[in-house]
Amino acid sequence: MKIDILSIFPEMFKGVLESSILKKAAEKGAVEYSVTDFREFADNKHKTVDDYPYGGGAGMVLKAQPIFDAVLSLADGKPSAKKPRVILMCPQGERYSQKKAEELAEEEHLIFICGHYEGYDERIRQHVVTDEISIGDYVLTGGELASMVIVDSVVRLLPDVIGKAASHEQDSFSTGLLEHPHYTRPADFRGMKVPDVLLSGNHAHIEEWRTKESLRRTWSRRPDLFEKYPLTEEQQKWLQEIEKEDNPY
Ligand code: ADE
């Protein structure tokens, strides 16, 4: 996968793209990152990328020209036959989700546009962008941090980036429910004990415990997730039992 990021603060990405799994993914050849300062594309003497809004009002608006030309140059230089997804980071966009991460992980080329202004000239939205994404209902100083969240969640889904494929198939949200609790050694930490079933070696019992704990956690923290999750008859029965408990968590 090729990931291009357009930002006037390219230095913000260094620590994130050059650490941990994102760095390893690039070293393995699963992904190639490129961060471009779109100010380089401004066709005016002072390299300005923003201007006053028509009709007046507070704040500046990101100009169409530098973004149009930057995206055009990146899209033309692409090695793949597929058209790139051009993603505008903005609080008005579609709310980001694991489902969207899975969809983007199928692409060959992603281009992120990160702005720092009151808004973007509307023609960018209309003619350049394929997706507008918000990472949540709050306003950041710019799209950079939001794009890093998306890059991180997409790259970890690419083939061979995370050691065991199973480790993300079980992720919270990938299954539709929140993940069950985990424990590691020691079995007794300062009097706090690991549930016996996990030490039993009985895999069928362990799987049942994990499914019930996953249901319990989802019910207490994110009951909205059940709206889209088809429960088996057995799971429905377990959930009814959980709902009768006084204090599940
Ligand atoms: N830019 C500013 N706030 C944002 C948000 N919540 N999501 C995506 N991009 C943004």
Image (cartoon, rainbow, N blue to C red):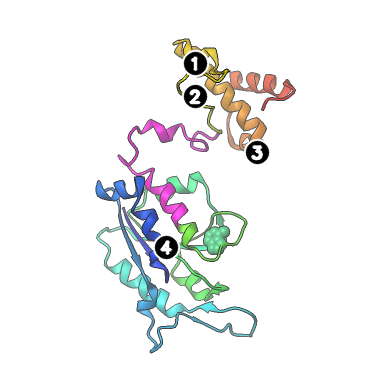
Q: Which mark is residue 12?
A: 4
10 Å crowding of disc 4: few (<14), some (14-19), many (20+):
some
* Residue located 32% across and 35% down the image: 163
* Residue located 28% across and 48% down the image: 30
Q: Which mark is residue 198?
A: 1
Q: Nearer the viewer, mark 3 or mark 2?
A: 2
Q: Main secondary structure of the magenta part?
A: loop
Q: Nearer the viewer, mark 1 or mark 2?
A: 2
10 Å crowding of disc 3: few (<14), some (14-19), many (20+):
few
Question: Of callouts 1 and 2, which one flags the residue occurring earlier in the amino acid sequence?
Answer: 2
Position of residue 55 measured from the top left corner of the image (x, y, whole percent): 63, 85
- Which region is colored magenta? 148-177
Residue type (three-letter) at the residue carrying disc 2: Tyr
Q: Provide the secondary structure element on which disc 1 rests.
A: helix
**Tags 4 and 1 in contact by the CB under 8 Å rule?**
no
Residue beneath disc 2: 183
Residue 184 position (above or below residue 82) = above
Residue 174: say if magenta: yes
Q: Provide the secondary structure element on which disc 2 rests.
A: loop
Residue 162: say if magenta: yes
**Tags 3 and 2 in contact by the CB under 8 Å rule?**
no
Whether residue 187 can be seen here: yes
**Tags 4 and 3 in contact by the CB under 8 Å rule?**
no
Query: What is the C-alpha distance between the residues marked 4 and 2?
Result: 35 Å
Query: What is the C-alpha distance between the residues marked 1 and 2?
Result: 9 Å
Query: What is the C-alpha distance between the residues marked 1 and 3?
Result: 29 Å
98 and 148: which one is in front? 148
Residue type (three-letter) at the residue carrying disc 3: Asp
Quadrant of the displayed image that contains ligand 1: bottom right
Position of residue 196 measured from the top left corner of the image (x, y, whole percent): 53, 12
* Residue located 54% across and 27% down the image: 181
Residue type (three-letter) at the residue carrying disc 1: Leu
